Image (cartoon, rainbow, N blue to C red):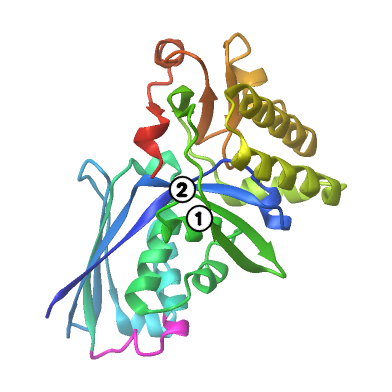
Amino acid sequence: MSKKSFYSNGKLLLTGEYTVLDGAKALALPCKFGQALEVEENTSGEISWESYDVDQTLWLKVTFKIQDLLAGNILSEDSAQSRLANILIEAAMLNASFLDIHKGYTVKTTLTFPRNWGLGTSSTLITNIAQWLSIDPYELLRQTFGGSGYDIACAQSNSPILYQLESEKPIVTSTFFSPEFSEHLYFVYLNKKQNSRAAIAGYYAKRSNIGDVITAINKISEEVLASSDLAEFIRLMNHHEKIMSEVLGLNTVKEELFSDFEGSVKSLGAWGGDFVLVITEKNPALYFNKRGFQTVIPYQEMIL
C-alpha cells in the first residue's frame, strides 16, 4: 500500500506566555524546524512505531497490538510508550475507523531539531497524527497534553500568527512579522527542556489581577507587530519580562543568569528553560558559549 507523509512546524512564543491560557493575544512564530511522520497501512493488526531524533538516533521503538489498544491494555513502565498509546486511543475516539483489528500500520517519525530543544515535539506529533486521521488537532490536544493550542496553530502555519482563545476556542490570525532589525535577534538554548504542564500549574497557582495583565500583554503584542525600531522593540520585550516576572514571582532570566550581558534577554514559553530571545547589537555567541550555552541561532535561521 502507498506510503503517506505529513509534516508540522515547530514553534516559539514571542509574547503572551502563560497568559495565552487566559485569553491574551499571543504572537507566535512557526520555526524552520519540525517533525515528519510517514505511515504505511497493512493488515497486521499491529501498530509498529519508530521515532528518530534529528541525528537519526532511534529514541522510541514500540509495537502495539490494536486489540490491546482497543481494550485499554496500555500499561508500560516507559512513559513515552504510555503517552503514545494514550494519544492513539484518544485519536480513535475521534476517528472510529482508525483502530480496527483487521488493519495495521508501520509508522516512522523524524525530528529536524534535537528533541530536548522544546520546539514542539508533542505538538508536531499531535498535528501530524491529526492530519493522518483527518481529525481536529485541537481536540486531540485537549484530550492528551492540554495547553492553549498555540503550538498546534504554528504547526499548521507558514507565517507568524496572532493567537487568542475566546470561550476556549482558538482564534488564529496570520500576520506579518519580519522586523528590519532581525539581524540583531538571536535564540539561545538554556540547556534544559521545561515541563510545560508543571510550568502551567505554577502559573495558575500564582496569577492574580489577570484582567489587567491581559490588557497589558495584548497592547504589547499589537505594538510589537507595529514596531520598526530596535530600541522600541527592546523596550516592549523588557516591559513584557517585567510584567511576567511580577505575575510569576520569579526573577527574569537576565537577572538570574545573564546580569552582566549588554543587551536584552526575554523568556519564550515556560520560564527557566528551552529558548530565550536575545537582542544585541553584535553576535552574542562568544558571550553565551563562554558560559556553557553552545546553541545560539540567528533569527533568520530559526523562523519561517
Q: Above or below — where is 84 with respect to 71?
A: above
**Is 34 in front, or is 200?**
34
Q: What kind of element bears circle 1?
A: helix
Q: Mostly what secondary structure, the magenta segment?
A: loop
At 47% across and 70% down in the image, what residue appears? 137
Residue found at the very far right of the displayed protein: 209
Residue 199 spot, x, y in % from top left: 64, 45
Q: What kind of element bears circle 2?
A: strand
**Disc 1: CA contacts within 10 A as few (<14), some (14-19) or many (>=20):** many
Q: Quadrant of the N terminus?
A: bottom left
Residue stretch in magenta: 92-102
In the image, taking residue 77 as reference, residue 251 lies left or right, namely: right
Do the residues bearing badges 2 and 1 touch, measured as CB atoms within 8 Å? yes
Which residue is under mark 2?
11
Does 101 appear in magenta? yes
Q: Which mark is residue 151?
A: 1
- Identify residue type, mark 1: Asp
